[in-house]
Image (cartoon, helix red, strand yellow):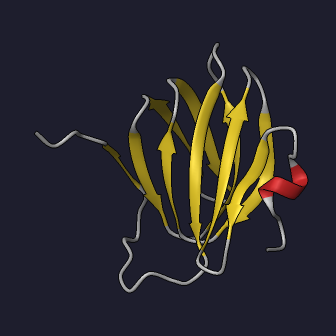
Amino acid sequence: MQSDPAAIAPGHVRVVLENEHVRVLHVRLGPGDRVPSHSHPSLVGVFVSTGQVRNSVPGRGHDDLDARPGEVFWSPPVSHSTDNIGREPVEMVLVELKHPPARSKAEPAIQELRETP
């Protein structure tokens, strides 16, 4: 990966598991912290904490997210920067897929993880 977030921001992003199928990243950003422009393949992410995150995509502007623990999101391959724009640290786990999924959505989506009865 030409702009690996774990390589460019090792104080904020760490690889916790890697095999031939996935790479799992743990991301922790303090208030005002930033991961400069980087890239991901398709991924699934889970917010571990509450927080406010801004993802900026060159040429497309930015999305501000109010994260809650347990929220799950999908992203197709993307190059972006990430900023903690809140007052509290924010943590998330990203599961990068090493092989493209059979089907993918064009836009990322956030869905709350719900327990089944």
Relative to 75, residue 93 above or below? above
Quadrant assignment, res 106: bottom left
Relative to 42, residue 116 above or below? above
Could you say which is closer to the camera, residue 10 or residue 56?
10
Outermost residue toward the left?
Answer: 117
Number of marks = 0
Task: Estimate the x, y position of residue 94 in percent, counting from the top left.
Answer: 58, 53
Task: Estimate the x, y position of residue 50 in percent, counting from the top left.
Answer: 50, 23
Could you say which is closer to the camera, residue 2 or residue 46?
46
Task: Pick the quarter of the image with the N terminus.
Answer: bottom right
Could you say which is closer to the camera, residue 91 or residue 32?
91
Look at 72% across and 20% down and name the residue there. 31
Look at 52% across and 27% down and name the residue there. 49
Task: Estimate the x, y position of residue 4 in percent, counting from the top left.
Answer: 81, 63
Relative to 46, residue 15 above or below? below
Relative to 41, residue 68 above or below? above
Look at 66% across and 21% down and name the residue there. 89
Task: Pick the quarter of the image with the C terminus.
Answer: top left
